[in-house]
Amino acid sequence: MKKQRLGESNMLNCGEVATIVKYNSAHDMIIKFDKTGELIQCEYVDFKRGGIKSHFTPSVFGVGIVGMILTVNEDGKQLDSYHKWVAMLERCYDKKLHIKHPTYIDCSVSKEWHYYPTFVKWYNENIYEVENETMCLDKDILIKGNKIYSPETCCFVPQEINLLFTKANARRGNNPIGVDYIKKNSNYRARCKFGKGESIHLGIYNNSTDAFYAYKKYKEMVIKSIADKYKNKIPLILYEALYKYEVEITD
């Protein structure tokens, strides 16, 4: 039986073929994944059922590869780097999420970041703290309109800054950003809302263009003031991007 099982191959549930390369007993054997060469000690019953997963199989939303690296700390709590990596992949590749958040449909993650250890290296080199604020992974402040998560396009930002760029596309309809139509009076209202706070009304206008430019002036002023607030707490490249940021009628 030992000789018969040695060299036996099986297509596992993870989509990879593995072969028994060492067999001591049904409870002590080593398999080798044919594609990656990864070695795993396991039991024969698990091998036959196909339940063993390779650390190098794209198992996270069909593209993410965890690799041979820890994803939890000593207490078993998920690492922030892993949480942000999975959330990033979810935004780009989870079709169920796209139903609720269609703005992510055309977004993607660079291939190098499909591999978690590569993302972790970048994370450790770029993460920083700002008091007790949640730090968010952002892809389109440094490069406006960017749709690709990558080392060149992303940065960490405090949540207060991240919320500055949240858009309520469904509410505004076909109107420019910061503008909604008041059907009762057939005019347009400019207002600015940040995060979960109340909207700040900026005035009523006869056309959507004038309403937009009122919003644009106010929003850019606010972005600059927030940039100044965080000037000595955030990377210079982020500060400069905030100061140069322009709100456009096509946003």
Image: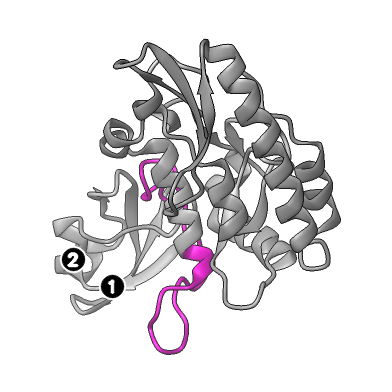
Q: Nearer the viewer, residue 69 or 17?
A: 69
Q: Which mark is residue 42?
A: 1
Which quadrant of the view contains residue 251?
top right
Q: Is residue 63 magenta?
A: yes
**Considering depth in this image, is 55 or 87 the residue closer to the camera?**
87
Residue 223, how many percent across, how many down? 70, 46
Q: How many circles with numbers are drawn on the protein? A: 2
**Image mark for residue 183:** none
User: x, y percentage for residue 247?
Assistant: 67, 28
Q: Is residue 63 above or below residue 50?
A: above
Q: Are marks 2 and 1 in contact (CB under 8 Å)?
A: yes
The residue that mark 2 highlights is 46
- One can see residue 145 in this view: no
Q: Residue at x 49, y 58 (%)?
A: 84
Q: CA distance from mark 2 to mark 1?
A: 7 Å
The crowding category of the residue bearing disc 1, from other C-alpha atoms within 10 Å (few below 14, some 14 to 19, many at least 20), is: some
Q: Secondary structure at mark 2?
A: helix
Q: Is residue 144 above or below residue 236?
A: above
Q: Position of residue 136 (x, y in %)?
A: 56, 57
Tell me the residue at 46%/88% (across/down): 74
Front residue of 170/116: it is 170
The kind of residue tagged 2 is Asp
Residue drawn at the location 53% of the way across and 46% of the way down: 114
- Magenta residues (range): 57-82
- Residue 229, how many percent across, how many down? 75, 62
Magenta span dominant secondary structure: loop
SS class of the residue under badge 1? Answer: strand
- The quadrant of the picture occupied by the N terminus is bottom left
